Amino acid sequence: MSERGLRPNVVWISTHDINPHIGCYAGVWPGAEYATTPNLDRLAAEGVRVDQAFAAAPVCAPSRSSILTGCYPSSIGTLHMRTKAAPPPEVKLLPEYFRAAGYYTTCSHFTDFQVKTPPTIFDEWGDKAHWRGRPEPGTPFFAQFHGLITHESRIYLGDAEFARETADVTDDMRHDPDEIPLPPYYPDTEVFRFHWARLYDLITQMDHWVGEILRQLEDDGLVDNTIVVFWSEHGPGVPRAKRWANEAGVREPLIIRWPGRIEPGTSRADIVQMMDLAPTMLEMCGLPVPEHMEAKPIYRADGTAVAPNQYAFGARGRMDEQQDISFTVRDARFRYTRHLHPDRPGMQHLEYADHLATWAEMRRLTQEEAMQVGSGQAPDRLTPLQRSVVGPNKPPEELFDIDRDPHETANLIDDASLQDVKARLSKALDGWLDTYAETALIPEQDLIDRWRPGGASQKTATPTIEIGDLITASCETPGASIGWTTDAPRKPEPPTFLDLAIGSPDRDGRYWHLYSAPFEQPDLTVWVRAWRLGFDPSDEVVVPVGERL
């Protein structure tokens, strides 16, 4: 409860494909000093900047699945990119807990949690979803704003469209490609400088979007009783970042503001896993944290900081047609990574990414070096570090001293002085694998056969309805959630490809209440249905007006 006796609201603002490339992270993350982000810098000055926050996976859907469930993707079957999993029955999506507790839950508009999102999760979903749609001014809310502004795809827009997409970035805020600080594992070419300059411009545009949301909270008088969280889900869409299980793949910005609870202008240097956000939000709002959640709260209900993690663990699985598995663990200083297929290149062919200019540039320079070798010349287009990005294989193990080498340029796995560190991190990773990586080590097709026997999705059981003074509903399918509506069935809008890929809720034009307790039947016909994550929904039960059983 807040000092005013009200349950705190929650606003999540998330973006895509960045490390802590935010001005307030200058001195913490390389290149952050070049960012123009006044709104996020102010948010950090009013709250806490988390300096060592890590995603559970270096690509969007698996990472988001962990953040929205509080469970490791390697544990619940959501590790492989664009799989549609059937997680264990106890696993729920975080907003449903809030909705069951009386919160108004919204999502604008990205889902992408590795499951089809049931309509029981959000009161409002779509481009216009907003806390302002709640039924009463005093209704607490959990509002998620997921923006695509910084996604890798936006970098390659045509000049005119890019100018429109970044219309709020003034000329004095634009980033000069010639001044961009490039990580050393990239060749210093026009392609990479153009990419990074545009990414920084998109970050500035994203910052403007964040500022608009923050101003709306101020306009509505909600700042004092609202927890605001800003985060990204994985690293930039360039080689050796997004899709790589390394520091640039999983190191994330995380800023939290909670007036009156979290001291403004502070920072945290302890290890935080992004999936810790799920139990943390429940704890902050005085809601119970489910026992099955594998993440831990990083703040108590009174705003006291907790440091539950000695390590942050992560993994990468299949990335579209790329077949590879890597596991990684990070302590306060070192990163240890284990590659299960060292014979495979880190930059395998990926149809989508190979059409991006930075990937194509690495391929072009590699091909030119092959031509140099073929003509008896010494290859000179890439440095040894850059060459390792596109090399034919990778080391079985890697160990990096992130404090001294944030770009992971020197693999210290054979350093005699660090064998104790290697052994400790290797043992920690083994323990994590034994506990939290069962589904990561099962062939994906075996998982799919388990989830969808014979190639067909399992169906959620039809709810059982009892009607007396109240309508009572139950479902025999373990883990099922029940919804009810007074909106008659209608033909849903056809889903777009993106809807199918990210598991968007059906666009059926019906408002589904989450059933959390027996309710009085309204003076209307009621339709009742059940959903279990990874299953097809149940048949609907129709309760006519005045029906009694």
Image (spheres, rainbow, N blue to C red):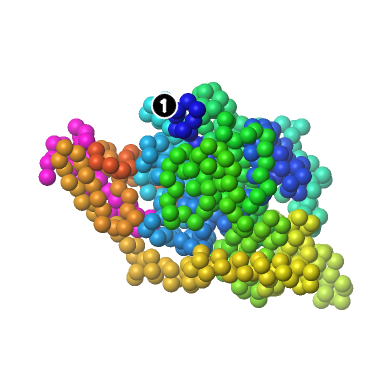
Residue 46 shows in the view: yes
Q: Nearer the viewer, residue 106 or 238?
A: 106
Could you tell me if residue 356 is visible in this image? no
Foreground residue, 345 or 270? 270
User: Residue 346 falls in which quadrant of the image?
Assistant: bottom right
The quadrant in which residue 311 appears is bottom right
413 displayed left or right of 485: right
Disc 1: which residue? 138
Q: Position of residue 416 (x, y in %)?
A: 79, 72
- Using residue 518 as the reference point, say whether residue 388 is left or right of it: right
Q: Which residue does the image show at 17% across and 46% down from the upper left?
A: 466
Give the residue drawn at x 27%, y 48%. Answer: 529
Q: Work out whether 190 lies above or below 434.
A: above
Which residue occupies 62% across, 40% down?
Answer: 255
Q: Which of the image's four quarters has the C terminus?
A: top left
Q: Is residue 38 or residue 225 the one in the foreground?
A: 225
Q: Amino acid at mark 1?
A: Gly
Total numbered labels placed on residues in the image: 1
**What range is drawn magenta here?**
520-549
The residue located at (58%, 63%) in the rendering is 315
Is residue 104 placed above or below 193 in the rendered structure?
Answer: above
> Residue 215 at x, y = what percent?
58, 27
Q: Is residue 524 magenta?
A: yes
Q: Secondary structure at mark 1?
A: loop
Q: Judge left or right: residue 168 versus residue 411.
A: left
Q: Is residue 22 magenta?
A: no
